[in-house]
Every structure is written in C-alpha cells, then in structure tokens.
Amino acid sequence: MARAYRLPGRAAEAEGALGAALWDASCEALLEDGDDLVAVFAEVVPGGAPGDELTGERDDAPAALPAVPPGGRWEAVDERDHVAAYFAGLDAVTVGRVVVAPTHRQALLQAGQTVLWLDPGMAFGTGHHETTRLALAALADPDLDLRGKRVLDVGSGSGLLAIAADRLGAADALGVDVDPITLPIARANADLNRSRARFEVTDFALAPPAPGGVDVLVANLFAELHEAFMDAYARALAPGGRAFLTGILAGKEDAVEAALPSSLRLVRREREGEWWLLAVERVAESGA
C-alpha cells in the first residue's frame, strides 16, 4: 500500500513550482484528478524525512511524512493502480512540427514533423502541460527558424525544450537548471533522442552566459523568477534575440511585463488556459 498526497484545486500547477516541489519530495507519479493534483509516494516508514503536519480527517498517516508543500491531505492508495493509470493516460502531444510521445506509445508523423521521445520522471516537462506546449509552439514557429541559432533553456528540467531546439535545427542548444537531480534525466533524454543538446547545473541568476551569447532563450518558470531574472535575460541575449517566457499564471503577466528592462521589448503575448507566454526581443541600448 502506498500513500497519495492530494492538493485540492491545484491540478493546473502540476508543471510549475508546486509540481517541482512534489518531485523533489520523491513522489513516484503526479496525476490530475479533476481539479485536484495528486502525488503518489511509496509507503513511508518511520525514520524518514519529517514533513508538514497531516491535514484532513484521515488518521492512518505514515509515521514519517515526506517534506511536501502544505495545503493537502494524505490518502492510502494502491500504488500500482495509480502509477499504471498515470502512464496509460499519457498520449503523444502534437505542437506544430513537434510530436512529444512516451516510449510506450506509437507516434504517427506528418511530413515535416519531428518526434521527441520522453517518459515522465523526476523532472517535470513532458509536453502535456499548457506552459510546455506554449514554449514548444514558440520554438517550432516557422517564422522563427532556429537553423544556425544558439538556444538557451533556463530551468531545463527534463531537457525537452533544449532537445526540441536541437531537433528543430539549432546550431547549439544548452539547458541549465539549478537542481542537480535534473542533469542525468535531461542527458538521458538527449541520448534517447540522439540529440546534441547539452545540460549543465548552473544558478542562472549568479552565472548567466557571456553577454550576447544566445539568439533564443526559453524559460518555463513561475512569474516571480522571471521578474528576478530580467537583467540576466537581457545580458544573455544577442541584439535582436528573442526570449520566450512562460509558466506565468494568469493575473501575473502584467507584473512580468512591467519588469522588462529598457533593453527588452514585448513582441507578443500568448495564452493557453490559465497560463501566459511573453515573447520579448533584445534591443540595442540607447546611445549604443
């Protein structure tokens, strides 16, 4: 018997900071049950990491709980049923010229499409969430044309976006993430897809790339991080370079736009569900 941690009304945050926190707590699967987000954990035994106090009405909580975000409740579940249902429900996702498919599915491609094989794991980013689809659509936009471009994926997680950039013709695709657990996952996904995309553990705020180092930057992060990273984005981009900033929950897009420095200008906004993507362009500083 396993344990599930249910967060009522939080399904939309499965691939945001909340989902990342649950993967960091060593959940084995994340499921959307209606509007609820459910994280499945193996049975916890005494001596495990202490966590937040149990909420809800159940009195059969394990003796030691994982360090999960507050606001949910524990439930006893059959782990095999939940994990099997999770994988069985994953289908291929098509975003323009890119098809993202789990390895247990077949992928039917049309002319000009490319397939990315990706199984869910201990880093989020499978193509099923609105924020990931928004980023993929931006990278696959025929008007962008990544051929010969240098691409940087900030907060690369599973590596999906950097790998997609490589498969779409980028001359160089680098993914950076502050969490070392993502590195072997992203590299394994690159190997699976025979991708040249590279991955590093880097604190982007402290060590952004050399000034003007990239032509395209993509970042699927929550709004507050975008605001904090704006100057680093501007330094990283070459003049005329584009940044695609997603993971922005509806209601926070104006604050992210307001944080743009004078060297970045808004090109467009895109919305899917409750999430926004802002496309911005690096412009020359006045007097430069």
Image (cartoon, helix red, strand yellow):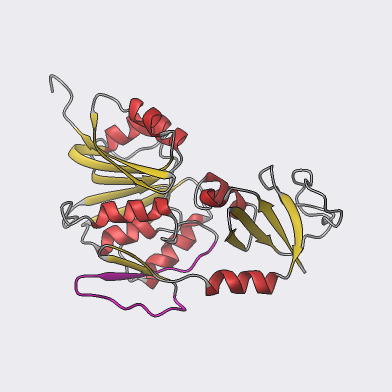
- Whether residue 105 is visible, yes or no, is yes
Give the residue displayed 43% in from the left and 47% down from the top.
Answer: 155
Residue 97 x/y as whole percent: 25, 65
Residue 12 x/y as whole percent: 52, 50
| Lateral position of residue 175 relative to residue 120, left or right | left
| Lateral position of residue 40 relative to residue 87, left or right | right
220 or 6, nearer to the observer:
6
- Whether residue 246 is visible, yes or no, is no
Q: From the viewer's perspective, is residue 248 above or below residue 59? A: above
Give the residue displayed 29% in from the left and 25% down from the top.
Answer: 261
The furthest residue to the front: 34
217 or 37, nearer to the observer:
37
- The image quarter containing residue 116 is bottom left
Residue 103 x/y as whole percent: 44, 76
In the rendered structure, does residue 105 fall within the stretch colored magenta? yes
Q: How many marks?
A: 0
- The image quarter containing residue 157 is bottom left
The quarter in which the N terminus is drawn is bottom right
The furthest residue to the left: 287
The rendered magenta stretch, by its main secondary structure, is classed as loop
Q: From the viewer's perspective, is residue 275 above or below residue 133? A: above
| Lateral position of residue 212 relative to residue 233, left or right | left
- The image quarter containing residue 238 is top left
| Lateral position of residue 89 relative to residue 112, left or right | right
Give the residue displayed 28% in from the left and 42% down from the top.
Answer: 243
Highlighted magenta segment, given as a residue range: 103-121
Residue 227 x/y as whole percent: 40, 31
Q: From the viewer's perspective, is residue 214 above or below residue 41? A: above
In the rendered structure, does residue 97 fall within the stretch colored magenta? no
The quarter in which the C terminus is drawn is top left
The furthest residue to the top: 287
